[in-house]
Image (cartoon, rainbow, N blue to C red):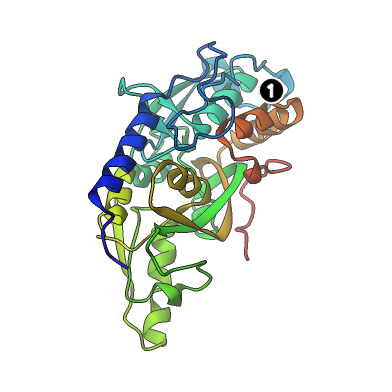
Amino acid sequence: MRTPLPSRRLTTAFALLTAATLTLTACGSGDSTTAGGAAPAGKSGKLPTTDVVSSVAKDDKAARLLPADVRDRGTLRIATSVGGTPPGSAHLPDGRTVVGQDIDFANAVAKVLGLRLKRETASFEAILPSLDSGKYDLGTGNFGVTDERRRTIDFVTYVNDGQGFAVRADSELKKITDFAQLCGLNVATGAGTTFEVTLEDNKHVCSDAGKKPYSVKTYTEPGAIWPSLQQGRSDVVMSTINGLRYAVRQQEGLRFLGEFHRLDVGFAFKKGTKLAPAFQAAVNRLIEDGTYDRILKKWGTRASAIEKSRISPPEIKD
């Protein structure tokens, strides 16, 4: 199961992924044109560029829920994890502009609240500790809401995503329902993610069954995960459901193995934040006025819709 993809197919996969990156254009720029329409990007490499944010109006009722000092300042410092493939967050070729579903949601919420975001990019594993230190007011990075994280972080939910697996087309693996199916394999995932924690916590199932444990291969750079799978250094990738679906559409010779565990995803804040009620009200306002659905439609993630935003809900248990 670890045979690398033939070189021609590997070259094609990288070419498609590069083409996808090059066709991204900035959201919220006022350009209402669409490359390939509002449907999710396919193997053509074309990505949706419809502006679904700039027309969002301020909601005074939601804005009044902000702490007075934030209303007076009018700005918030936001840390964004960037890398890998949409619908999360990715850089344009200029190396500065960041686009993606997380970006659209953050920008839309800011407009509802009448705020400007001062965005900085940061590594996924560095964002949550930086919130506690006060370096940032909030963070985005497809952060799943888990009971462990809720002990030190507050969340305001905006989508429901979760955990899934993908493999090369020549893999014998089918749908994964138990970690014992991974025994003896190399599993690639992002460093500092819920996937890494979940994999490490469940390694014992292999030794309990008298089988060789699987090996967890972590990567701080999301873009390095797929070459590890394509070139045979890894046998399976564990990542977000939406991210895996997108990546499989973009690259030849890969298969999505389905959903494993659903999780709510939210904006992340320092524990005890006073910003949560305002952000919750803003997300619910976007749901009511239709902006929410337009963002999901743009990124092909309508299956991740939530009915209402919640503040730090309990972890979803399957």
Outermost residue toward the bottom?
210
**Which residue shows up at 36% across the image and 36% down it?**
16
Quarter of the image containing the C terminus? bottom right
Quarter of the image containing the N terminus? bottom left
**Which residue shows up at 38% across the image and 35% down it?**
82
Q: Is residue 179 left or right of residue 155?
A: left
Along the viewing direction, whichever of 51 and 267 lies nearer the viewer: 51
Disc 1 designates what residue?
Answer: 64
Along the viewing direction, whichever of 214 and 285 lies nearer the viewer: 214
Along the viewing direction, whichever of 314 and 24 lies nearer the viewer: 24
Which element carries disc 1, helix, strand or loop? loop
**Which residue shows up at 54% across the image and 29% down it?**
106
Rendered location of residue 269, percent (x, y): 51, 40
**Which residue shows up at 50% across the image and 13% down it?**
29
Q: Is residue 145 left or right of residue 136?
A: right
Q: Is residue 24 left or right of residue 295?
A: left
Outermost residue toward the right?
288
